[in-house]
Image (cartoon, grey):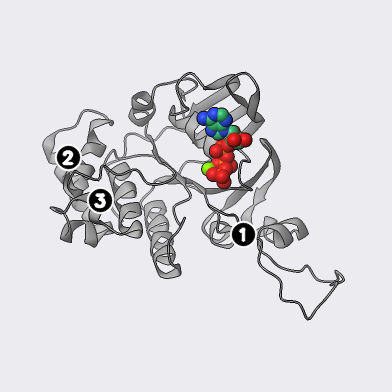
Amino acid sequence: MRSLSPPPSPPGGLDVRNLTVTYGRSVRALHQVSLHAPEGGVVALLGANGAGKSTLLRAVSGTLPLRAGQVVEGMIRFGPDDLTGRSPAEVVAAGVVQVPEGRRVFSDLTVEENLRAGMLGGRRRRRAEADENLARVHELFPVLAERRRQAAGLLSGGEQQMLAMGRALMAGPRLMLLDEPSLGLAPRMTERIADVIRQIHERGTAVLVVEQNAALALELADHAYVLEVGRVRLSGPSEELSRTDEIRRLYLGEQPEGEDELSSSEPREPARWAG
Ligand SMILES: Nc1ncnc2c1ncn2[C@@H]1O[C@H](COP(=O)(O)OP(=O)(O)OP(=O)(O)O)[C@@H](O)[C@H]1O
Ligand SMILES: [Mg+2]
């Protein structure tokens, strides 16, 4: 499969070590978090609301809120590059792009203008290279070609998610950070987004995905981390994690075998995270 013109492959992928992030004086959102996302792999980040998942992605992409958010300890490396405290543009230039929570497309710009804006934050490119990446994004998301002249604000939620992902791909990333890509989407659209994540991975881009749909995240990822109040509570190969009682009960909404049910007649709601 063709790749989206990635820059030369840095060895080692993303390495986050002992990362501590605070907001203002009192909120410690991450405490000594270490995580590795290998080159070309898919890693999932799970955890309840407020666990620090978005904070971790934002610390990596350099988009912590100005003044309020601060990396107070630790290190973020991507291959040979030290990304700790770098600006968003520098992080994109190093090959790491983020698709933030809530998509954030430019509603008044057309679909194509949104996509081309994805090139601006990236490395300086020739026009031919931009056209080539645009063609590949259209191949991945045909709807973005069909709607190229439409205002982005008129797209459905799922289409806006595709646009946000397409825009990130325009920079030719080696690593894509995805924050809750299926949030608020119907099951069919969620499946479509999952397919695209698989294709992005097949084309050689690594993915670090925060996902409220734990079953989907564990199916997509080779490896997963569970954050709990700013700390890594569990990590391991997805297949192993999905067999642990804790994950099955809290994140997959299952009743582990051998555990007494208080009332077997009462239907159990799967444990899901609210938006
Ligand atoms: N700008 C901010 N100022 C102050 N505190 C913040 C800010 N952003 C996040 N926090 C706090 O940091 C902690 C982690 O938030 P974060 O958004 O990273 O969680 P999350 O795991 O992404 O949650 P969710 O699943 O709800 O998206 C929370 O306690 C949150 O209230
Ligand atoms: Mg979040």
Q: Which residue is mark 3?
A: 153
| In front: label 3 or label 1 | 3
Q: Which residue is mark 2?
A: 129
Q: Quadrant of residue 142?
A: bottom left
Comparing 12 with 197, the one in front is 197
Residue at 14% in and 33% down: 126
Relative to residue 122, is residue 141 depicted above or below? below
Specify the label residue 272 is tagged with: 1
Proximity of marks 2 and 3: CB atoms separated by less than 8 Å: no
Residue at 76% in and 69% down: 255
Residue at 57% in and 54% down: 274
Image location of residue 192, percent across then percent down? 38, 64
Comparing 4 with 53, the one in front is 53
Q: Disc 3 residue type?
A: Gly
Judged from the image, the secondary structure of the residue bearing numbered disc 3 is helix
Proximity of marks 3 and 1: CB atoms separated by less than 8 Å: no
Q: Disc 1 residue type?
A: Arg
Comparing 228 with 275, the one in front is 275
Question: How far apart in space, not on screen, are marks 3 and 1 (Cα)?
Answer: 29 Å
Judged from the image, the secondary structure of the residue bearing numbered disc 2 is helix
Proximity of marks 1 and 2: CB atoms separated by less than 8 Å: no
Relative to residue 117, is residue 82 depicted above or below? above
| In front: label 2 or label 3 | 3
Nearest to N terminus: mark 3 or mark 1: 3
Determine if residue 230 is in view.
yes
